[in-house]
Amino acid sequence: QSTAPVERTPGAADPAPVHAEMVGVFEDFGGRPGLDALMDEFMTILLADPRMRPFFEKVEHDRVKRQLAEQFCAILGGGCAYTGRDMVAAHGAHRIDRADFNALVEDLQIAMNRRGIPFRAQNKLLAVLAPMHREVINR
Ligand code: HEM
């Protein structure tokens, strides 16, 4: 199976090429409106989860949701540019371990299920997020 980038129409913004395994996945998430709705759901779940609430209760929810939607849009080949901090800088003020990481991924999966995102599309995203534990976990 080829992983060569798929050709896109060149445009002024010229986003990064979409990798073959991501073709159709952004649409499965409902495009950018779908990602924004997913982040509303995700943040609601995080704040209701006693394991996650301490991390998220004091941050600017609208900003973090927007940056997450932007980052996921970029990952999924939606043509967005991520403008937030890198993962080490974004998480350096928080002490995050493996259990915290797993709990957050669990909550993301609940949010994706509630939004009816196909399992195959969920797994494409999770496969990209999983190795990011190296930058996010800092204790
Ligand atoms: C693959 C996993 C993760 C990804 C892709 C991710 C992504 C992001 C992004 C894009 C931001 C915004 C960046 C910015 O502020 O410029 C952010 C912020 C944040 N993340 Fe994560 N994150 C992940 C895991 C976690 C985990 C496991 C926790 C804690 C349990 C966490 C807690 C936070 C908090 C509290 C903020 C707000 C930081 C602040 O403004 O002080 N994240 N994350």
Image (cartoon, rainbow, N blue to C red):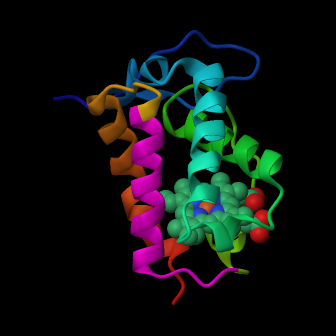
Q: Residue furthest top?
A: 9
Q: Is residue 9 left or right of residue 93?
A: left
Question: Which contiguous range is marked in magenta?
Answer: 94-113
Could one spot residue 83 in this view of the protein?
yes
58 above or below 29? below
Q: Residue 55's x, y, as percent?
A: 66, 71
Where on the picture, by quarter, is residue 129?
A: bottom left
Q: Is residue 99 magenta?
A: yes
Q: How many numbered marks does the figure carry?
A: 0
Q: Residue at x 38, y 21 (%)?
A: 23
Q: Is residue 124 magenta?
A: no
Q: Residue 26's x, y, as percent?
A: 48, 24
42 above or below 27? below
Q: Residue at x 16, y 29 (%)?
A: 1
131 above or below 63? below
Q: Residue 61's x, y, as percent?
A: 78, 51
Q: Residue at x 81, y 45 (%)?
A: 62
Taken as a whole, is the magenta stretch helix, strand or loop?
A: helix
Q: Which of these two is toward me, 74 or 63?
A: 63
Q: Residue at x 39, y 18 (%)?
A: 24
The quarter of the picture showing ligand 1: bottom right
